[in-house]
Image (cartoon, helix red, strand yellow):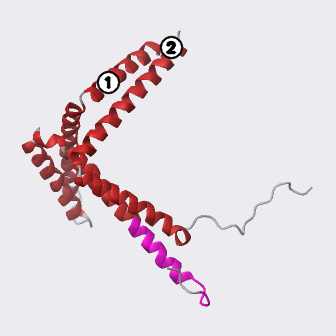
Amino acid sequence: MSSTTTTDESTPGYSLERGWRTLALAGGVIGLLGLFAIALPVVTGLSVAVVLGAVLIVSGIVHGAHSVTTRGWKGSAWQLAVGAVSLVAGLFVLANPVIALVSLTLLLVAYLVVDGIAELWMATRMAGEPGRATIGASGAVSLVLAALLWAGFPADAAWAIGLIVGVSLLFTGISMAAVAISGRRGDETTAPAGEPRRA
């Protein structure tokens, strides 16, 4: 009995050599967004706070709706409590995005301190192994950034989150573009001899 489904093995799947243009375009757009965020860190930071508030509100509504539909379940009261906390927190963030930025900056300082200590501790346990200096340097940079943010707190709360988001987006875009360029080079080297290289 013959199979009713066939697989076309000749259909090529996605490859970086053929799809590098799309990746390069996406990287360029993300990089431009990063530059925009760096140029306007306060606007970016406030936008992050507003999005966070909206997410908390939606989360609270979902938790509350779920608790209503699961009456009789022992965890429904817990769901309702979590939903109420999320909803109140989201409304607070939307009503006071600047205060939310202050809280986010404190969380960022705490993260950098923990990250820096963890990387320095890891570097001390990597005696003689490659990459030890890089990890140690990264940990030191994290601690320096945490100290600088704390020294300028709360004045830097208005722009710190926006700037870091911008830098992250910029480097993500650059890395995507770099991968796309490597795919383009692969496309050029694998092109048939009789065909002109694609621009």
Which quadrant is home to the N terminus?
A: bottom right
**Where does label 1 land, which residue?**
91
Question: In the visual, does 133 lie left or right of 173?
Answer: left
Provide the major secondary structure of the magenta segment: helix
**Residue 55 locus on image (x, y percent):** 39, 32
Which secondary structure, mark 2? Answer: helix
Kindly identify the residue that appears in the image at 70 percent across and 67 percent down.
11
83 or 91: nearer the eye?
Answer: 91
Which secondary structure, mark 1? Answer: helix
Label whose residue precedes the other's in the sequence (2 or 1) = 2
Question: Crowdedness of circle 2 by 10 Å Cα count: few (<14), some, many (20+)?
Answer: some
Q: Amino acid at mark 1?
A: Leu
10 or 160: nearer the eye?
Answer: 160
**Where does label 2 land, which residue?**
68
Image quadrant assignment for residue 152: top left
Question: Crowdedness of circle 1 by 10 Å Cα count: few (<14), some, many (20+)?
Answer: some
Q: In the image, which residues are magenta?
A: 177-195
**Residue 87 locus on image (x, y percent):** 36, 22
90 or 70: nearer the eye?
Answer: 90
Q: Amino acid at mark 2?
A: Val
**Residue 165 locus on image (x, y percent):** 28, 49
Indicate whether 114 appears above or below 188: above
Question: Is 180 a magenta residue?
Answer: yes
Question: Is 74 a magenta residue?
Answer: no
Q: CA distance from mark 2 to mark 1?
A: 21 Å
Question: In the visual, does 82 lie left or right of 141?
Answer: right
